[in-house]
Amino acid sequence: MTSFSSCCPADGLAWIDALAPERPDVFVTPPMPGVAASGLAGLWPVAEWRLETGGGLEGLKAFCDASAGPALGFLSYQAGFPGLGVARRPTAFPEGVFRTYGAVLAPSPDARSVTVHAATPGLRDAALRLVSGARRSPAPPLPALHAPRPSMDREAYAAAVRCAREHILDGDAYQLNLSIRFDADWPAGSDPQALFTGLLARRPAMFYGMYHDAPYTLLSTSPERFLRVRGGMVLAQPIKGTRLAGADPVAAARALRASAKEDAELSMIVDLMRNDISGRCAYGSVSVEGHRSVFLVDGLLQMYANVSGALRPDADALDLLWDALPPGSVTGCPKARAVELIADLEPHHRDAYCGCLVLRLGPRDLDSSVAIRTACHDATSGTLGFFAGSGIVVDSDPHLEYEETMAKAAKFLALARRNTP
């Protein structure tokens, strides 16, 4: 698109609140210690691609290439199943949607200004009117959820873990990710966007995403990068290994790094991610750095590694993304068999959970997150669905895996505890 651009002062990411009446799609990294703000919000969609009717990968690339501007979208957990030779399970939730916009807004690295890029001067000015003067105010109360209903209770989840271990012992897989889905009644009159901005203010994480596709609103608070491509340089940052930070995060981090089980979980997925990106990367360019790095988010210590490579000159960043679906850190190894076993062990659909949110800037530039710590509001049923899970290996303790799963769901479960007398 022809771009008409202007910049105005900003008070952090308060301008996202100001966009609420226009139902923006958002993919942002909030400013945090040592982390610069980035990402963008899209207003007034001008074109849309849907996986069910859009011609797969080649259709998506053609859609994105038809616009000079950025595209925002998501791909569901099942979007990559055909590439694995695995059948998708029927679900009402869309498998993938991408959009281009009449206007996009991007924060400066210090979040002290926001730049508007628009297709026309009129759209630019309309966006500026929305965000000019937006100021941070005390975060409003978060909505109180009613009666979250888990797809598996403690004993059912423990039984699924034991079954997963049997599959591992039988040689069917060597790691499986198992999740629980929670469905909670949504309070009448509450706006799901208020939950998004309220959590963004209170519980920052690397990748906040919001996507509207009526009757659904996808709300992601993910700490995990899936794939970034910047000028053809590829970075994956799979997370595997979790500990409660507790009263002594330094000691907890030391214990996390020293755990043979957690190291095995991470090493398996790092090897899987190396394989997933190698087909589209230059020969010999794929490497691993920072193995067993640790960061803190949501009161949890998370362990990860940096898997990097150089995109081949004949490859598009979307080729790389498509080949790696669904993200390896939330499936297991080997991936095709893992997703088949997960379908047998989990009594729920994952929908967008464990898929990815994507910001595509150009043929060799994109960023994406793994859709974990993610919820979906369904306006038709009046519910909020959210998920959490853990990686299962041969020496997993079923009840400890359940506790880890509940800890990852805590930010959403806390909304229900607020409603408990």
Image (cartoon, rainbow, N blue to C red):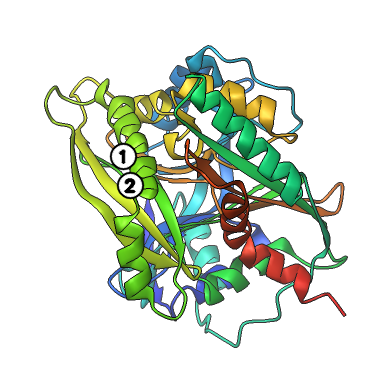
Q: Residue at x 41, y 52 (%)?
A: 241
> Residue 285: percent from the left, percent from the top?
13, 31
Instruction: Give residue 23's quadrant in the image.
Output: bottom right
Q: Residue at x 71, y 80 (%)?
A: 141
| 21 relative to 224 in the view: left or right | right
> Residue 249: percent from the left, percent from the top?
38, 74
| 79 relative to 287 in the view: left or right | right
Note whether residue 80 is visible: no
Q: Is residue 229 above or below residue 63?
A: below
Q: Is residue 37 above or below residue 165?
A: below
Outermost residue, left direction?
284
Residue at numbered disc 2: 263
Q: Nearer the viewer, residue 83 or 260?
A: 260
Q: Is residue 1 above or below residue 174?
A: below
Q: Nearer the viewer, residue 93 or 174?
A: 174
From mark 1 to mark 2, how far is it between C-alphas?
6 Å
Q: Residue at x 63, y 15 (%)?
A: 87
Q: Nearer the viewer, residue 238 or 46?
A: 238
Q: On residue 267, which mark appears?
A: 1
Neighbours of disc 1 within 10 Å: few (<14), some (14-19), many (20+): some
Q: Nearer the viewer, residue 265 or 326?
A: 265
| CB within 8 Å, label 1 to label 2 | yes
> Residue 315: percent from the left, percent from the top?
26, 23
